[in-house]
Amino acid sequence: MKTALITGATSGIGKSTAIELAKHNINLILCGRRQDRLDTLQDELSKKVQVHTLCFDVRDKDKVFSMIKNLPSEFSTIDILINNAGNAHGLDPIQTGDLDDWDAMIDINVKGLLYVSKAVIPKMIAVQSGHIINIGSIAGKEVYPNGNIYCASKHAVDAINKGMRMDLNSYGIRVGAIHPGLVETEFSNVRFKGDDQKADTVYKGFDPLTPEDIADIIAFVVTRPYHVNIADLIVFPTAQAGSTIVNKSL
Ligand code: NDP
Ligand code: 8X3
């Protein structure tokens, strides 16, 4: 049986991915900062597969490395890494953007992804195999007004994904990214700092993607035969044709 480590498994895309991969009999290492949510998911999914939880902030370099290094032996081989933890913080023009928001997005979406990857990659190199899925965004392919630093962080993920694929190619490690458009999760609740009404308006008037839609695609990607690597995938809701192009009449 394979083992997948999923960051950001307490909510949205990461949580749905955990549920979906369990259906494919993939053992799980679930990561996030909210231990209560990790425990609930572990209770639910351990009826089907083996589940281990790691409670860390991806910004905490020492914790990331020590927790991944000291995994119990039955979880020490990681076949699949889903680099999913991340969020937008704020939606402000560059001239009034909040420095703490900028730090959060760069530190979590970029540096956090790098720390987790750096901790996991040696385990994959040791067995000359592995599969890394980086969750980017359409914001990593396009820039939209007020998206500035979030878009920059996801453009960085796009570049890191491509670089990782080249550098890990000789070790037989598959690397690919999935870049979703609008997915209704807690993403906008975080972006708007708990203003749930404002968050809801983002997904009003059209059918957004659900986290299950992305989880389904991730499961497809990681269950392809070893010689198949889905390298880069943009996924929109049908109503969306670009970052700022959403057809609200559908
Ligand atoms: P959610 O807010 O629902 O989930 C975000 C997850 O990331 C949570 O599990 C959260 O866990 C985790 N996380 C956030 N900050 C940290 C941190 N500092 N350390 C560890 N874990 C952290 O959003 P989504 O599911 O939508 O987002 C998942 C990914 O998908 C993100 O990378 C996002 O950028 C990307 N994305 C989302 C889109 C959307 O429209 N929703 C579209 C395109 C990409 P916890 O708080 O417990 O730590
Ligand atoms: C999340 C989608 O359009 O808010 O990455 O940037 S968007």
Image (cartoon, rainbow, N blue to C red):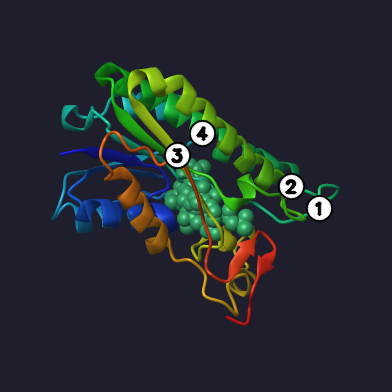
Label 3: which residue? 231
Report the residue at 52% width, 75% height from top.
207
Residues at marks 2 and 1 touching, judged by CB atoms closer than 8 Å: yes
Q: Amino acid at mark 3?
A: Ala
Q: Say which element carries label 2.
A: helix
What whole-number distance in Å separates the C-alpha atoms at marks 4 and 1?
27 Å
Distance of label 2 from label 1 (alpha carbons): 7 Å
Instruction: Identify the secondary structure beneath mark 3.
Output: loop
Mark 1, residues whose alpha carbon is within 10 Å: few (<14), some, or many (≥20)? Answer: few
Q: Identify the mark nearer the N-term, 4 or 2.
A: 2
The quadrant the N terminus occupies is: top left
Name the amino acid, label 4: Asn
Q: Which residue is mark 2?
A: 148
* Amino acid type, label 1: Pro
The reply to whether residue 87 is in sight is no
Q: Position of residue 146 (x, y in %)?
A: 76, 54
The quadrant of the picture occupied by the C terminus is bottom right
* Residue 136 pos. (x, y %): 53, 45
Q: Is mark 2 within 8 Å of ligand 2?
A: no
**Contact (Cβ within 8 Å) of mark 3 with mark 1:** no
